[in-house]
Amino acid sequence: MRILLAEDDLLLGDGIRAGLGLEGDTVDWVTDGLAAEQALSTDEFDLLVLDLGLPRRDGLDVLRGMRRRGDLTPVLILTARDKVADRVAGLDSGADDYLSKPFDLDELLARVRALTRRHTGRAQPALEHGELRLDPATHQVTLAGAPVELAPREYALLRLLLEQRGKVLSRTRLVEALYGWDGELESNAIEVHVHHLRRKLGNELIRTVRGIGYGIDRPADKASS
Ligand code: CA
């Protein structure tokens, strides 16, 4: 992700740039409002982190100007002034989120992630189940935040079971979903995928209903059983 950082506090800017860099983002850093406008007019960014108190052009003016031009880049504003009015003005001028200084770098990074998630307009929200998370937009699966490598059919099976959480899906249904009508199929293909998923994600996740099929319980189902 490419982020434009507009911050005239050199120490703070350096910390933000380093933190975002560790997240794998590319950060272009400007230290005044005019330079920010210039960068926005010539380059595309996925996010603008904008200090409101900037020299040469106030952050609010930068924000209003870009929204007037129809620039929809997500904006996270930073304000040193602990005034509600500032934050309200910022949000009303088209900012997507704000942080009041001083703030924790971890919180800034989390807000940046949240904003970019929203902005990338994922067609479907991530599927979450306990510590397991599957993101249909990126095909990424994580367990307690750690990426899990799944083969394509394992991924497809997991996604289907998560989408149909609380139901038991028959073997036939799963075979059709994964292989379509024409797939030549060893009789135990689904069992093998389930075995691999259990090995990677834990034995408790997928329930076998003998003679019927497989399912993932909703958390509430689990609690009541
Ligand atoms: Ca400032």
Image (tube, helix red, strand yellow):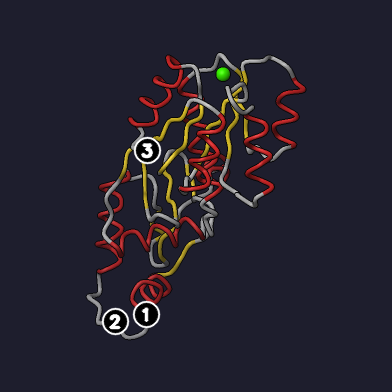
Query: Which of marks 1 and 3 precedes in the sequence?
Result: 3
Find the distance from the CA under tag 1 to the CA under tag 2: 6 Å
Q: Amino acid at mark 1?
A: Gly
Residue bearing the label numbered 2: 183
Task: Give coordinates of residue 87: x percent, y percent.
Answer: 71, 26
Task: Give coordinates of residue 57: x percent, y percent.
Answer: 61, 28
For numbered disc 1, what is the local secondary structure?
Answer: loop
Find the distance from the CA under tag 3 to the CA under tag 1: 39 Å
Query: Disc 2, ligand 1: is the CB inside 8 Å?
Result: no
| Left or right of 220 on screen, residue 178 | left
Residue bearing the label numbered 1: 180
| Left or right of 214 on screen, residue 64 | right
Task: Give coordinates of residue 158: x percent, y percent.
Answer: 39, 57
The quadrant holding residue 170 is bottom left
Q: Residue at x 48, y 38 (%)?
A: 113
Query: Which of marks 3 and 2 precedes in the sequence?
Result: 3
Using a 10 Å C-alpha cutoff, classify the residue at mark 1 as few (fewer than 14 neighbours), some (14 to 19) or many (20 or more).
Answer: few
Quadrant placement of the N terminus: top left
Using a 10 Å C-alpha cutoff, classify the residue at mark 3 as few (fewer than 14 neighbours), some (14 to 19) or many (20 or more).
Answer: some
Q: Nearer the viewer, residue 121 or 52?
A: 52
Q: Nearer the viewer, residue 51 or 178?
A: 51
| Left or right of 33 on screen, residue 214 | left
Find the distance from the CA under tag 2 to the CA under tag 3: 42 Å
Using a 10 Å C-alpha cutoff, classify the residue at mark 2 as few (fewer than 14 neighbours), some (14 to 19) or many (20 or more).
Answer: few
Image marks 1 and 2: residues in contact by CB distance under 8 Å: yes
Image depth: mark 3 or mark 1 in front: 3
Q: Residue at x 25, y 69 (%)?
A: 188
Q: Amino acid at mark 2?
A: Gly
